[in-house]
Amino acid sequence: MRKVMFIAMLLSIGFFQNAVAQQFEEEEPPKEGFDKSKLFFGGNFGVSFGSGTYVNISPQVGYRFSRLFAAGTGVNFNYSSYKYYDYYGVEIGKEEYGYAGLSVFGRVYPISFLLLQAQPELNYSWGSIKYSDNSIPSHKQEGRFVPSFLLGAGAAIPTGPNGALLLMLQYDVIQDARSPYGSKTFFTMGYNF
């Protein structure tokens, strides 16, 4: 019985050593310099039509520097318009607003699927209000640059070997009166390739 236990113990040690050796053989040494396999692409896209129209196109490109840290840049474009109608369904006015700009972001992954993100942005804002019957003069909002600084947290849910669905809660800490993000915490959903 002791011989059988001794042989089983030796075999277990041999299998364990083999498994550990394979684990270290499969891990590739870190590459030095730029590694294009660490690039990722993604962003947000949204469209809504009806009495109000909303379009959001915000592509991003980033680089995964390590398991814990990624950073990148993106462009933003938001357009919204709202039509107003009287009691009889006749259009009485229309508001149009737009934002276009640039952003940079940094992400920290404390756990592989959880992330914290900081994203400063600078957007150019414009808009107008037009009334159909000209009883009130139309108003054009003077264009200007609007700073935003988004802080957020969320999850990166893997959807295969090369993609992840990003679900995040974000908040603009600058709170400029013309911020495209409003004064409340907001939810975003995006995808990274």
Image (cartoon, grey):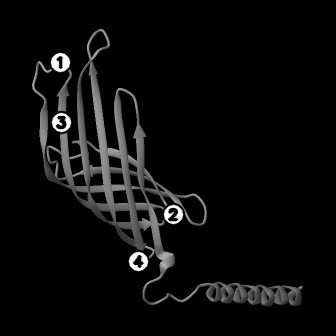
Point out the tag, 4 or 1, that comes first from the N-terminus.
Answer: 4
Point out the tag, 2 or 4, that comes first from the N-terminus.
Answer: 4
Residue plotted at (74% across, 88% down): 13
Question: Amino acid under label 4?
Answer: Phe
Question: x%, y% of residue 150?
Answer: 26, 55
Mark nearest the camera among 4 and 1 is 1
Crowd band around label 3 with a 10 angstrom C-alpha radius: few (<14), some (14–19), many (20+)? some
- Secondary structure at badge 3 equals strand
Query: Marks 2 and 1, how far apart in space?
Result: 49 Å
Tag 3 near tag 1, CB within 8 Å = no
Mark nearest the camera among 2 and 4 is 2
Figure check: 189 above or below 84: below
Mark nearest the camera among 2 and 3 is 3
Mark nearest the camera among 3 and 4 is 3
Residue named by callout 3? 128
In screen coordinates, is 119 left or right of 133? right
Query: Marks 2 and 3, how far apart in space?
Result: 37 Å
Query: Marks 3 and 1, how far apart in space?
Result: 16 Å
Tell me the tag on residue 133: 1
Question: x%, y% of residue 67?
Answer: 45, 74
Question: Amino acid under label 3?
Answer: Ser
Residue named by callout 4? 65
